[in-house]
Image (spheres, grey):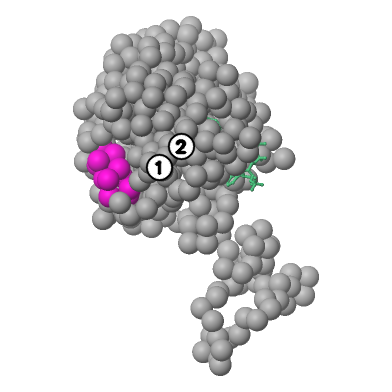
Amino acid sequence: RLPTPDSRFPTPDSRFPIPGLRAPGSAGATAVTLRDRVPYNERLHARATGPAMDFSFTEEQLLIQDVARRIAQDKIAPSAEHHDRTGEFPLENIRTLGENGLMGIEVPHEYGGAGMDPIAYVLAMIEIAAADAAHSTIMSVNNSLFCNGILKFGNEEQKQKYVRAIAEGREIGAFALTEPQSGSDATAMRCKAVKQADGTYVVNGKKSWITSGPVAKYIVLFAMTDPDKGARGITAFMIDTARAGFHRGKTEPKLGIRASATCEIEFADYVVQPDEVLGREGEGFKIAMGVLDAGRIGIASQAIGIARAAYEATLAYVKERKAFGAPIGTFQMTQAKLADMKCKLDAATLLTLRAAWMKGETEASGGRFSTEAAVAKLTASEAAMWITHQAVQIHGGMGYSKEMPLERYFRDAKITEIYEGTSEIQRLVIA
Ligand code: CAA
């Protein structure tokens, strides 16, 4: 039953009158809708009067979730231990993900992607991350940090040139913002791009912790073009790693997500052509932040996938493992841990789906969803760390052993509290 109108919860129109908005079809009516004119938070409030929440997924969203789940179970999970142990880049699996649309989920068909929405992206990322976090790291950089940024800020030629190969998984993309001396404080970058008389730019400097750097064909690079302007002096460029002046440093040995290759890169008089500028000169910081808003939804999804894998493994284990004459799942201390794991997992999932929904809602208007993305990433990454910690604890010695994947989940979870903005930075963004 729908609630009856209640004066304590005024309708959107009476509480938020929209100046100049006429009823559709009336003289002088414009195409402006309530959605365009009323801020998100107010709409949420206004919707409290009706059946506003619909938790069902569309057929398309369920379809891509199913595709991702099958690839995760058939191809990724069986080799996850091998990739973690050896650190070998899973190129063949990445190709399979690309062939099935998972490297460009939100990329329109005309640029080689699956043409789906941000919620589909979240559902697919969770499935892949539950099988192996390293695969989902590579997937998230291709999807959110690379394709998403070019689709949002690139021109038609750039979309045609760079997005298709990455969305189809034939090539790998990367995103270069961090430097040895600047991580959270991204505007403190030293990598410089100096404009020449002919309109080209000459780039010099170093970038560090570049996910997929060792294998990337193209990189979205952020460099200082006008150091006096701080955040407004940063410009985004498209880099072709096959060109002269681009160099890779050593691949970083890491605690977790070991099959996702990470390295330092260096530019020595690398020449960027004028048509390789992404967006406009000086817009780079806003592009980086906008792209990271989308990226943080991907990392939240990754964290949920890792946490879900740890939770499900624990749920099975407590039914099998006996102590003091009974399965350990019959003990209240274990049950309390499982209940808390479940609450954190559900909260993280719902907040991440909300952020993805919000991203979809603001797509046309260009509005921001920074807070929702930061809330999702912070909640999900801290949930993943806590849940994997408890999962190892409940498994005891077996949780600490490499015979089971629990210790891998624990190691993999940690990065979600660090990259694409640490938990401290997420709190700063939210505050
Ligand atoms: N969208 C659009 N514009 C934004 C924005 C966003 N999300 N966030 C900030 N801006 C704009 C501001 O409006 C402001 O614009 P004006 O100059 O016009 O007013 C401008 O950018 C500067 O904003 P701030 O003054 O807030 O910037 P700040 O220097 O104080 O920094 C910060 C803010 C939140 C700390 C930011 O630097 C940040 O997020 N740091 C973390 C960086 C990060 O996440 N790094 C991860 C590395 S990438 C990675 O991990 C990838 C990987 O390999 C997987």
Percent position of residue 210, x then y: 43, 24
Q: Residue furthest right?
A: 8
Q: Residue furthest bottom?
A: 27
Dot 2 falls on a residue whose secondary structure is strand
Q: What residue would you read off at disc 1?
A: 199
Task: Kindly indicate whether the residue at mark 1 contacts the one at mark 2 (C-beta within 8 angstroms).
Answer: yes
In which quadrant will I find the C terminus? top right
Q: Which residue shows up at 54% across the image and 81% down it?
A: 30
Give residue 264's quadrant in the image: top left
- Judged left or right of residue 296, residue 165 is left
User: For the point 32% across and 49% down, which residue is it?
Assistant: 159
Query: In the rendered structure, which amino acid carries the disc numbered 1?
Result: Gly
Q: Which residues are magenta?
A: 158-169
Relative horizontal placement of residue 180, taking residue 119 as reference (left or right): right
For mark 1, give the secondary structure. loop
Q: Is residue 182 left or right of residue 87?
A: right
Checking the image for residue 258, the label placed there is: none
Q: Quadrant of the N terminus?
A: bottom right
Front one among 282 and 253: 282
Measured in 3D between alpha carbons, the distance from the residue under mark 2 to the one under mark 1, in whole angstroms, is: 6 Å
The image quadrant in which ligand 1 is located: top right
Say which residue label 2 marks: 195
